[in-house]
Structures are given as C-alpha cells and as structure tokens.
Amino acid sequence: MAIRIFIDQGHNPAGNVNAGAMGNGVYEGDVTYQVGVYLANLLNNDPRFEARLSRPTATTVLGTSNASSLAARVEMANSWPADYFISIHCNANVNPAINGTECYIFQFGTQANWLAVHIMNGITQNVGTRNNGIRLNPTLYVLRRTMMTSVLVELGYLTNPSDAQKLRDNQYGFAYGMYIGIMRYFGFQ
C-alpha cells in the first residue's frame, strides 16, 4: 500500500480570506500552491506514494475565515486518512534582513522531528536558503489537530529580497528539495 502524504498548500489565493503574506510582489498563496503541485507530481510519479493536495486548483478557496480554512485542511487529511501531513508556507518579517527556511513541529524527538530535519536539509541544499532550524510550535492548529506525523514548512521570507527572488523563480527547486528530504527520511535515497 502506498504511503499517503497530504500536502497542504498554506493559505488561499490572493484576494480571499486567509490569503497569507505578501512581500516584494510575491504572494504566499501563489507560491505555496505551485510548490505543492510540483511536490505532489513528484510523489505521485513514484508508486510508493500517493499524494493529495488541499488546493487542487489555483482558484481553490478553503473556508470562509482563517479558522474554518485551517479546519477544512485538517479534516481533509484526517478523513482520508493520510499517513503524513506537510503544510507549506512562506514567512514574512518587518525586518527585510531576516531570511531562511524553518520547519515547525508539535514535539521534539518524534517522527515529525526526523522528517522535518530531512525536509530542511533537502530545501537548504537544493535552493540555498539559510537553515534556521527545526522549531517547536504546539499551538499551530495544523500540527495540533492532525492525527498523523505533521510538519509545517516555512520555505523562506517573502519580505527578504533574496528569499523572495528564490520563492518567485525557483518554486520547483523548493518542491524538489522537499521531495529529496522525504526520500531520505524513508531511506529511499
């Protein structure tokens, strides 16, 4: 049986509720959508995996508020049921110098922790963002409420010119880095 991975493309398209961050002319919902599509395609081309997306089309809008948008994503993953949940995001900061990739997990010393380390290394090695480490955030709804191993990935900072350029121009690179990390986590590479 294939390993089921639910890919949550964080946030909705620009102009909708829960649209996410924007910086340097780049919208979070656009980046997360496309990176998720690339990652799902990579995984679905391998018979060992079955991947599903929270936003199967660029215009898919989940929920009517931030809370209902998050609840819809978690419900989709839990009801499938997925074996793994990966939520893709882009970061923002008032200080444009802040940059890099982070992964958030519910608890250290878990499978999520190990998966996050591999995803982080895959991204930073493949696209050259700074490794800001694995961070604990048990308050994040998608980490608290999913019933499977879950990781939230902040690809980079839209508010940092260098990260924003990578997020705009190398979305496949981010997806491929995540894919490599997943392969290494499972010992397939």
Image: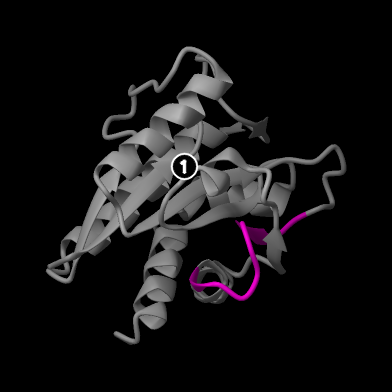
Vertical placement of 110 versus 40: above or below?
below
Which region of the structure is painted magenta? 99-111
Provide residue 150's location: percent of width, then percent of height: 48, 56
Foreground of the two, 5 or 141: 141
Q: In which quarter of the image is residue 162?
A: bottom right
Viewer-nearest residue: 48 or 92: 48
Image location of residue 44, percent across then percent down? 18, 59
Q: Where residue 58 appears, x then y in whole percent?
A: 33, 29
Q: Which residue is drawn at 40% across and 82% down?
A: 184
* Placement of 98 over or under 59, stated as above or below: below
Image quarter hosting the C terminus: bottom left
Residue 99 placement, left or right of 111: right
Q: Does the magenta stretch include residue 100?
A: yes
Q: Which image quadrant for residue 131?
A: bottom right
In the rendered structure, the answer to whether residue 136 lies left or right of residue 86 reads right
Judging by the rendered image, the residue that carries numbered circle 1 is: 32
Residue 18 in sight from this viewpoint = no
Q: In which quarter of the image is the N terminus?
A: bottom left
Residue at image x 61%, y 76%?
109
Q: From this viewpoint, is residue 145 visible?
A: yes
Q: Which residue is drawn at 38% across and 43% down?
A: 34
Q: Is residue 156 magenta?
A: no
Count up the numbered dots. Answer: 1
From the viewer's side, name the closer residue of 2 and 145: 145
Dot 1 crowding, Cα within 10 Å, few <14, some 14–19, many 20+:
many
At which x and y percent is residue 25?
62, 31
